[in-house]
Image: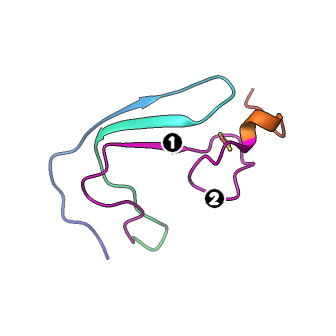
Amino acid sequence: MEQPIKKVTAKLHLTKEGPIRVEGKFFLVSLDGDSLVPDDTKEVYLCSCGASRNKPFCDGSHKSGARKRD
Ligand code: FES
């Protein structure tokens, strides 16, 4: 279900070979519009390498060097 728009302030931290750290007040929704994290979540790590078995979240698989961002 679509989340109502509330004040959202998020900071995204990019790293060269690891996850994208998202911190702040935000919503993370699936392609179907379902919420992927509780509303009070203040930090998540998103997979940027494609190797996670728990997408969109990082599961640490990037540490194996399976795939790296350019
Ligand atoms: S960035 Fe960690 S598993 Fe992809």
Choose top left, top right, bottom left or bottom right for residue 65.
Answer: top right
Q: Is residue 8 shown in magenta?
A: no
Residue at the image position 54 percent from the left and 45 percent from the top: 46
Residue identified by numbered label 2: 54
Question: From the viewer's perspective, is residue 37 above or below residue 9?
Answer: below
| Residues packed near mark 1 inside 10 Å, few (<14), some (14 to 19) or many (20 plus) | some
Choose top left, top right, bottom left or bottom right for residue 54.
Answer: bottom right
- Spatial separation of the CA atoms under disc 1 and disc 2: 11 Å
Disc number placed over residue 23 in the picture, else none:
none
Question: From the viewer's perspective, is residue 1 above or below residue 17?
Answer: below
Query: Which residue type carries mark 1?
Result: Tyr
Query: Which residue type carries mark 2?
Result: Asn
Residue 61 location (% of width, % of height):
74, 44
Left or right: 20 in relation to 62: left
Give the mark nearer the N terminus: 1 vs 2.
Answer: 1
Residue identified by numbered label 1: 45
Q: Quadrant of the C terminus?
A: top right
Whether the residue under disc 1 has CB within 8 Å of ligand 1: yes
Circle 1 — which element? strand
Left or right: 56 in relation to 24: right
Choose top left, top right, bottom left or bottom right for residue 33.
Answer: bottom left
Residue at the image position 60 percent from the left and 46 percent from the top: 58
Magenta stretch? 34-61
Q: Specify the principal SS of the magenta part.
A: loop
| Colouring style | rainbow
Query: Which is more toward the observer, 14 or 63?
Result: 63
Left or right: 6 in relation to 58: left
Circle 2 — which element? loop
Residue at the image position 29 percent from the left and 71 percent from the top: 2
Residue at the image position 31 percent from the left and 61 percent from the top: 38
Question: From the viewer's perspective, is residue 7 above or below residue 33?
Answer: above
